Image (cartoon, helix red, strand yellow):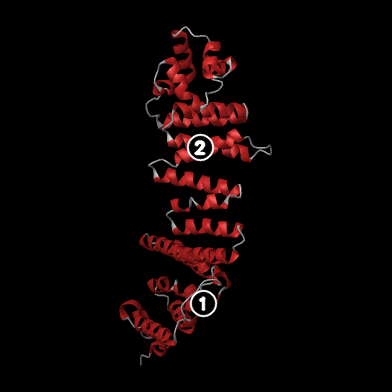
Amino acid sequence: MKMGDVIRKHRKNKNMTQETMAARLGVTAPAVNKWEKGKSLPDIALISPIARLLNISTDELLNHQQALSAKEVDRLLVAADKKLKTEGIEDGYEWMKQCLFEHPSNHYLALNMTSLLDSQLQMMAAARDARYDDFILAGYLRALESDDENLKSSAAEALYYRHIRNEEYEKAEAYLDYFSQNSERKQKQALIYQKTDRQQEAYPLYEEIIYAGYQRLSAALGGLYSLARQEEDKSKAHWVVEKMQGLAKLLEFGEYHEVSVALELAQSEKNVEETLDIMSRMLNNLESISGFTQSRLYAHMTFKDISEDYIADIREGLLESFRDEQSFGYLKEDVRWQAMVGEN
């Protein structure tokens, strides 16, 4: 039973007219009529007075129901979307308001109905009605109370961007603590810095995101490469290595990083020419192992200087690995390899 039906049932049980009820609540008779027909809902401040007047509990008035199933929620969301698009914002708003009154603890429904109205209003050029903004804010805040971390994060993100659009940057910043992923939080913080003319604080955050992004993407591509090798998909392995090389080039990590990612593939295929070329380029470009420190992409980040001793240690470590017969025994008779690694 909907709230309007509950009001009508108990009003009639008490032999009370709509006019009498309206007078006792300080509202108009047409307002009561709209409640009972489901065209609008009482203001939240009237819920307790109505319940007392009708001698029922607020739970009965609000008609608390059992938890909605996922299919039922989806049907309500589809209906809400259709109402907004075919019957207009006002009717859609009133219908959604009633739905959320009837299902006050369904955070998923609150978040998604709120998002539907918010999105629809953003596409309209008309001036915003304060009632809609209050409804949207209340819906997102309700979803923020959820125990579901994903739902809570989605609500926080919606609130963050809502305040960004309204140029309420301090309010937007208050929601950053809801984002556990470091890069996601940094990007949102950087946007606030950018919007508030703090460019010198925004730059390093964006740069750190790019720098860390290279590490994550490179590792993910490395995983794809390993899968391709396990499946003995030679074509895909070469394709992934090209992507890894392209990533290092795009984000200006230096030639050493561009060439070194192809060494394992050349070694697995016992490709003498390719292996020797990669080895030579790695040794000749050791200084570029920190090439990203010279890139404008990371101009506002601070890096430790790499010493000559560190480069020398890397060189010796590479030569030692290149001498490993188990890995590179197929090069043993090649005079170029012998000269490179110091073997006679």
Tell me: residue 25, above or below residue 136: above
In the foreground, 312 or 335: 312
On residue 254, the disc is none
Label 2 neighbourhood size at 10 Å, few (<14), some (14-19), many (20+)?
Answer: some
Tell me: residue 295, above or below residue 43: below
Residue located 48% across and 81% down the image: 281
Q: Position of residue 1 (x, y in %)?
A: 44, 18
Which residue matches tag 2? Answer: 138
Q: Is residue 158 left or right of residue 323?
A: right
In the foreground, 244 or 231: 244
Mark 2 or mark 1, which is nearer the start of the sequence? 2
Q: Position of residue 149 (x, y in %)?
A: 40, 46
Label 1 neighbourhood size at 10 Å, few (<14), some (14-19), many (20+)?
Answer: some
Which residue matches tag 1? Answer: 291
Residue at the far top in the pictured view: 15
What's the CA distance linking mark 1 and mark 2?
50 Å
| Residue 75 visible in the snapshot | no
Tell me: residue 97, above or below residue 243: above
**Identity, as a three-letter code, of the amino acid under mark 2:** Ala
Residue located 38% across and 71% down the image: 268
Residue at the far left in the pictured view: 326
Q: Position of residue 230 (x, y in %)?
A: 35, 61
Figure label count: 2
Q: Position of residue 143 (x, y in %)?
A: 45, 39
Query: Disc 1 or disc 2, which is closer to the eye?
Result: 2
| Residue 186 visible in the snapshot | yes
